Image: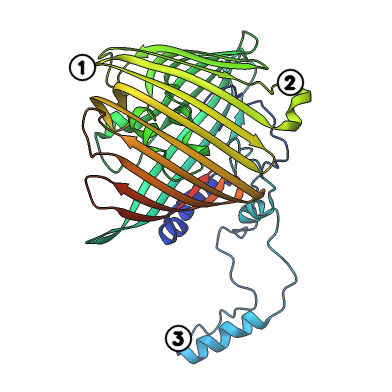
Amino acid sequence: MKYFFGIALLFILISFPVKAISAEVLDGYAQDLLETPQENEVTLEVQDSSIFAEDGNVEVLENSPQENEAVIDNSGFDSELFKMFDKDNDNVIDEDTLIGKVLHSKITRTDVPSYLYKDDLTFKFGETNPVQKVQVYGIYRGSIGAIFNKDNYSTEYENLTTQIGVLGSFKNPNYRFKFSVNPVQSSGNYFDQFISNAYIMNTSIPHHQIIAGFSRPQIGMEGGTSTQILPFVARSQIARNFGSVKSLSVKVIGNYQYVDYNFSAGSSGRSITSGMPGTEFNGWVNFKPLGNEKSKKYGKVIIGGGFNGGHNRIDYGVGSLYVGYHHKKLWANFETAIADGYNGSKGISANKACGYAATVGWKFNPHWQLIGRIDQFDPNRDASNDMKREYTAGINWFIKGQALKLILNYVFCQNQNTDDSHKIILATQILL
């Protein structure tokens, strides 16, 4: 029964608060899917036996008489309502209740995704079973935005992500798997976008992960970052035009003290149903000059670069460079990319394009972060007067880390060939 409440909460949270308001860890990158402990985090258990009475009927309000259920007018209703309101009750929300466990949890980490009901949705099986452990999870990201330019104004709701998935480990603990689907989609071919992840990971080589299946390739730093830890509602223009895709491939990921790397080869198709329209190679290397323990007091520096190239109706190639710095409450990075054709989330283009994004953020405490970004994109270097620039200011409220988060963004869009526009976007993220 307790799992029923976890699923029910997902739909309640989606239908009520989202409509009202609406990096460094990469997807599957150097992160143990199931076993890595997370400091300063309390995972939750849901065992609420008090919601329903023993006879299966919903419990009634205390001191609510049932003998004379006569219809009363509004004044009588309000009178009874305030009688219940005035009644003193020293009890706060119980930590053992479904909502109480969320309110009292102490999830504070924001560099990794945490799940509100991880313990309750994790299942272990017998030693003879080929699958030893699984964790079921749900993700929801939605936003409501006000968009206005010179001549018009519009308000639109957008379902950014609705995902259900499972993480698991086999009898051999060096083999893990991830499978997730997108059951709710707003546009495009439903079956092309239905499967979000489907891969097997092997960790038998020290400092390495080998991933085979449908997953996110490392095209740029932000373009290869998990959606669950994005600092803004939307990715930068270079990230969403050049990257932010999934593909069938084999990846080799290494993680050492001073260097990380991610190399993959596979299909240039962007859905699991696209087959093999062509081949693609992705390579990315990060250098960490302050990687030793003595240097950590000066912060964390990452200098990275990579290349994405392949064929899908056209030959394409994208080169990227990245510099990032994180020290205590300060976080800043700069990424630039240049392309001779590209194959990103916005589609295939033979244009020669380029752009950059510069971001800075300040985290006042574990729950509040102020961020800003300057983001420029030239969709065709051979054409003039088509530059697009976005200035974004945002506030992140990490209610429970990345598991329960509100995002407020203001975006000023400056376009050379169209009218300038403004966006105010309010979004929420829920990880169950």
**Horizontal side, residue 270 vs residue 58: left or right:** left
What residue does disc 1 label? 313
* Tag 3: amino acid: Val
* Tag 2: amino acid: Asn
**Residue at 60 percent of width and 31 percent of height:** 123
**Horizontal side, residue 124 vs residue 212: left or right:** right
Q: Are marks 1 and 3 in contact (CB under 8 Å)?
A: no
Q: How many marks are shown on the rendered structure?
A: 3
Q: Are marks 2 and 1 in contact (CB under 8 Å)?
A: no
Q: Is residue 29 above or below residue 172?
A: below
Quarter of the rendering occupied by the C terminus: top right
- The local secondary structure at tag 1 comes to loop
Q: Residues within 10 Å of mark 1 (few under 14, many from 20)?
A: few
Of the two numbered discs 1 and 3 on the same chain, state the one appearing first in sequence: 3
Residue lying farthest to the right in this orientation? 294
Task: From the viewer's side, name the closer residue of 201 and 334.
Answer: 334
Residue 272 appears in the picture as rendered:
no
Q: How far from the left and from the top, in percent, is residue 160?
A: 39, 44
Q: How far from the left and from the top, in percent, is residue 319?
A: 40, 20
What residue does disc 2 label? 292
Q: Which mark is residue 337?
A: none
- The local secondary structure at tag 3 comes to loop
In the image, which is nearer the foreground, mark 3 or mark 2? 2
* Tag 1: amino acid: Arg
Q: Which mark is residue 71?
A: 3
